[in-house]
Amino acid sequence: MKIFPITLFLILTVSCEKVHYYPDKPIVGLKAAMAHRGGRTNVLRENCLSTCIEALKTEDGVEIDIQISKDRTIWLTHGLKVENCSGELNCFPETKDSTIENIDSCNGKPIGYTKFEELVSYTAVNCPNKYINVDLKGWFPCSGSSLDILSMMRLEIEQIIKIGIKYNYLDHLQIETGAVSVLNWGKKISSKVNTYLNVYGDLERGILIALQNKLSGISYKLHIGDELTLDYVHLCHKKGLRVITWNVVDDLDLKALQNIGVDFTEYDIN
């Protein structure tokens, strides 16, 4: 169905008006710079402990990606599959910890994996006021034994919260995903968990969903839809929502986003 400009304007206006129905709960922006994928560079590997440690020396925190193993352990990795150097690729949910732990290189290239708990343990002790943003992805099942994606994601958020509580670090963990039901599941486990809805393109709709579900805020992908402006950030802060942005590759963009009050800007370190 074709939506004419006047119709689109009315839809956006109505959506924005609904946002204003929610009570004001003003908060102050944090303006934190977050190292994307743990602080990967041309030299340092993404999503591993040593890279995160380097990033935490200079940045306000790190953004990391995770998967869960067959033993229900959370591992830092962007991909669903485990590299094992035998020419085969196995899914994390179908691979035991003992197999993952024994992988340290492949054809001379280091590919050892880091447990999420290792990162939280290090950060809680050495830089407890810095943040970890956890990108909890939905993914395609590897086989019939991993078809229930939402159940697997609920297991992931359960384990993340458990580790956050264990190290008294839950306040500084931000969990972001596009699955509202998973975020709500996390809130049932702990009311203190920080939950962010991944939003693509339609800011008003994303803000409204975050308010309806009493989430901590939104995680907005830049440059694919509505422009994230000072007014949008002010609206979120007025309603008590924090804002994460990703993926930023330019230092000027990082500064510009911080200047309009974005709370967590995930960027690639040059």
Image (cartoon, rainbow, N blue to C red):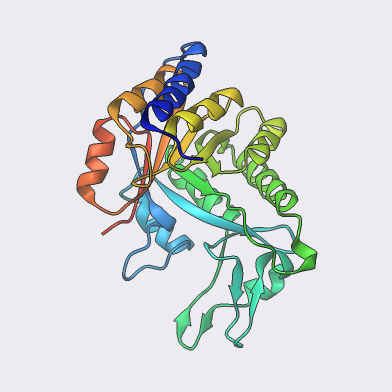
For residue 98, side relative to residue 128 (left or right):
right
For residue 63, side relative to residue 145 (left or right):
left
Q: Nearer the viewer, residue 22 or 224?
A: 224
In the picture shown, does residue 191 fall above or below 154?
A: above
Marks counted in the figure total: 0
Q: Quadrant of residue 37?
A: bottom left
Residue at 24% x, 32% y is 259
Residue at 42% x, 38% y is 244
Q: Quadrant of residue 39?
A: bottom left
Residue at 61% x, 27% y is 213
For residue 153, side relative to residue 228 (left or right):
right
**x and y percentages locating residue 54 in the rendered image:** 36, 58
**x and y percentages locating residue 32 in the rendered image:** 35, 38
Residue at 53% x, 73% y is 112
**x and y percentages locating residue 28 in the rendered image:** 37, 22
Q: Can you name the residue that lies furthest to the right here?
A: 145
**x and y percentages locating residue 183 in the rendered image:** 63, 37
Q: Quadrant of the C terminus?
A: bottom left
Q: Quadrant of residue 68?
A: bottom right
Q: Can you name the residue that lies furthest to the left here?
A: 252
Q: Nearer the viewer, residue 187 or 219?
A: 219
